[in-house]
Amino acid sequence: MKRPFFLMSYTTKKLCVLGLCTFGFLFSANGQEPKPRFPMPKAKYNVRIEKSVMIPMRDGVKLSTDLYFPEGAGEKLPVILVRTPYNKNVPGSDGDTPSDLVGQDYVVAVQDVRGKFESEGDYIVSAADTNDGYDTVEWLASQSWSTGKVGTTGCSYPGENQVQMAKLRNAHHVAMNPRAASGGMQYFGFLRGGAFELADGANWFLRNGSKIKPQLAATMPRSQFQAVTKYFTLNPSPPKVDWRELWRSLPLRDMMDKAGMPPTDWEGFVSHPEGDPWWDQFGYVKETDHFDTPGLFLDSWYDYGVGDTFKLVELIKKNSASPRARENQFIVIAPTTHCVYEDATEHTVVGTRDLGDAQFDYYGLYLRWFDYWLRGIDNGVTKMPKIQLYVMGRNEWRGENEWPLARTKFTAFYLHSDGHANSRFGTGRLSTEKPGDQPPDGYVYDPKSPVPTWGGPRSRNLPSGAQDQSDIEMRSDMLVYSTPPLEKGIEVTGPLEVVLYVSSDVRDTDFTAKLIDVYPDGTAYNIQEGIQRARYREGFGKKVWMKPGEVYLVRINLRATSNYFGPGHRIRLDISSSNFPRFDRNLNTGGNNFDETKWIVAHNEIKHDKQYASYILLPVIP
């Protein structure tokens, strides 16, 4: 298969400024810079900047905030706020000035969160964002140049802190635009089925998690300090590491120390499971929280939290304090990776998969959203479909109004084999027919030689997006089940789940699953993937161990997707016990895992017979 010419987009270049380059964001499939169909709107006004205004919080800590004023736009204006841990002075950070909104009819405020760069206080990941966001909105709304209406925007961390702040229901917070923000509900997005998102988590903490920041010397004027902080691109600059060596280092808990990092919250994040009361200090959204802010959410099929975004929006609607909020939660799902929605071209390639013309009028939508809620312009934005999603394979945008789609036919595709489903050369099959008397498929999981990650969500030091899995599928520790070539195309849009009946000779191990679209030429593109740590198969409130010879039910959450498997394509399911370094390795001992340096080899089995019919449940759209 020929690889496309990789043309790095402007947004990708901006991310590289922070060292966040990755393979497989978005590229053009030809050698010419494409002309965007929906360009960024031109500024209406010249902009005056007030740098580093120190806004006081309720405890006296002051947060540094840049204010962008459109000259001549009016005496009183609504405000759009971005709160970032990535340095407001550095162009290209995830929390960079939203240039599509600067120079419009808004004051734009960009703030360093507590403990980062120019802001005072101590940094703990996400812990202060709920109250600090509320206090910042209150201050912005009270200024003489403000109409009292504040909107929020931003992607990733600057998206998550919007929903965390929204649960306090500040009356001045009238609209939000969270993008890739599901981590505001799901433990910063780093815990999946009891496993830890190792590659992305280690990268984030090494680059952004330091509690050390530039300090203002007693004899240095603040103006001089502010003049040099723009050169502090990171907080402080992280040590250079051999990522492959670092990922494999044990114990997991000591990884940042081995990398030479100053203090971070890494140790706590990797050593506390989902549901642990320890997480309560961070302000992540809970089932009991209530909201009253209309929201325009964005996410993407090749990002880590797309399924959780649907859950977050449903929770907000369920717990909204007014019809205004309940009836005005919207979702747009792109086919891209993390926070690069606007980079789509007429030849959008995500990883190495050509997904057609995925352009969308994001900038226009952002402006219409805020114009409606902050300026009272009746532009019809609330009449758009509640969900706008890109159907991969069909390569088209489509509007929907519920999730799952009302016309969904949830269909079980059962696992079959003669006991030799190992690798893509084995006998594994997928079928809607239930299995009869069939022997189980077994494989060996050795933590010393885990199945490597290749593609998927936001692996910044690995190829991400859609990548050909066929080489990895030659491994004997991977079970591969495929349908015959499809006579008619099948659209799969909605939540995904794999149900397995398993056995093992160890107390605890992991089970991984990956949904694959196999093209007629044999290219096997990853669509979605997941993991489940066996000890948490009955919930995260308790640990339950396995016994040799016993059969256990394990459910693997594959989040969600929208993909059309065309005629001649095959639907494939890969099963194993590792996906490394995306997820940390289960060492199979039944110990804590995060503080261990030794492991044991697991012999795992997947059952598929009359009594134990394992399957993947697909949301088929007629």
Image (spheres, rainbow, N blue to C red):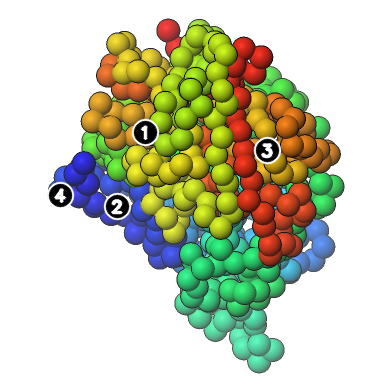
Badge 4: how crowded within 10 Å, few (<14), some, or many (20+)? few
Residue at image point 52% right, 34% down: 575
Please tell me whether residue 546 is drawn above or below residue 562 in the rendered image: below
- What kind of element bears circle 2? loop
In this rendering, which labeled residue sits more in front, label 4 or label 3? 3
Secondary element at tag 4: loop
- Residue 336 in picture, x, y percent from top left: 40, 40
Mark earlier in primary sequence (4, 3): 4
Q: Which residue is label 2 attached to?
A: 9
User: x%, y% of residue 2?
Assistant: 19, 44
Q: Which mark is residue 160?
A: none
Q: Amino acid at mark 1?
A: Phe
- The image shows residue 201, relative to residue 499, as above or below, that is below
Give residue 591's position: percent from left, percent from top. 77, 53
Between marks 2 and 3, how big is the CA–CA gap? 47 Å
The residue to which callout 4 is attached is 31
Q: Is residue 355 visible?
A: yes
* SS at circle 1: loop
Q: Which residue is pictured at 37% across the width and 29% down the height?
A: 517
Residue 425, label in figure: 1
Q: Residues within 10 Å of mark 3 (few under 14, many from 20)?
A: many
Find out whether the residues at labels 1 and 3 contact each other: C-beta distance under 8 Å: no
Residue beneath disc 3: 504
Is there CB contact under 8 Å for labels 4 and 3?
Answer: no
On the image, which quarter does residue 403 sit in? top right
Task: Name the foreground residue: 493 vs 138.
Answer: 493
Q: Amino acid at mark 2?
A: Ser
- In the rendered structure, are the residues bearing label 2 and label 3 in contact, judged by CB atoms less than 8 Å apart? no
Residue at coordinates 77% horizontally, 34% vertically from top-left? Answer: 539
Q: Nearer the viewer, residue 272 or 15?
A: 272
